[in-house]
Image: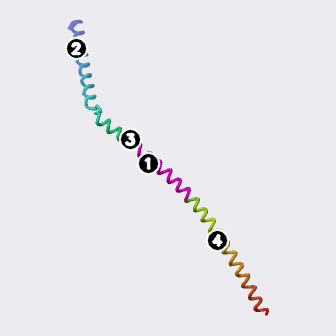
Amino acid sequence: MNRTQFIIATAIILFVAFCLGWFANWLVHRFTRVSRSDVGELEKMSQELHEAEETRDQAITYLQQREAELTNQLSQTEAELSAAMEGLRDARLETEELRAYIERQNSGG
């Protein structure tokens, strides 16, 4: 094999390799191509995801507001209960004092 034949054989091999690579690339793109319906479906899913995230954010905000309201109401109720218990304690003490006073009056008179 002389030099010219070697160059021609190498060129043919490289050309065949190039053609096989190009064909393989075409096949890969052919089978992995995204169709318009797939793009439309992805856009629809993206929009639905965005709406779901907005709904979730609104729900979280509502729950935080509701929790703050309930915490405030609980604090007020606890304060009212504490005041009522203290009033009841004072009333019982006053009742005991009056009962003791009446017993002293009855036993002394």
Quick check: 80 above or below 30? below
- Is disc 2 placed on a helix, strand or loop? helix
Instruction: Residue at the far right: name it.
Output: 108
Disc number for residue 55:
1
Amino acid type, label 2: Ile
Image marks 4 and 1: residues in contact by CB distance under 8 Å? no
The answer to the question of whether label 3 and label 2 lie on touching residues, with beta carbons closer than 8 A, is: no
Q: Quadrant of residue 80?
A: bottom right
Query: Which tag is nearer the camera, tag 3 or tag 2?
Result: 3
User: Which residue is drawn at the image coordinates 76% and 85% (left, top)?
Assistant: 101
Q: Quadrant of the C terminus?
A: bottom right
Q: Earlier in the sequence, mark 3 or mark 4?
A: 3
Spatial distance from mark 2 to mark 1, Cα to Cα? 63 Å
Q: Which stretch appears magenta?
A: 45-69
- The Cα atoms of the two marked residues, 4 and 1, are separated by 43 Å
- Residue at x-position 24% and y-position 19%: 19
Q: Which residue is mark 3?
A: 47
Image depth: mark 2 or mark 4 in front: 4
Q: Earlier in the sequence, mark 2 or mark 1?
A: 2
- Which residue corresponds to mark 4? 84
- Quarter of the view holding residue 90: bottom right
Local secondary structure at mark 1: helix
Q: Are marks 2 and 1 in contact (CB under 8 Å)?
A: no
Q: First in sequence: mark 3 or mark 2?
A: 2
Amino acid identity at mark 1: Thr
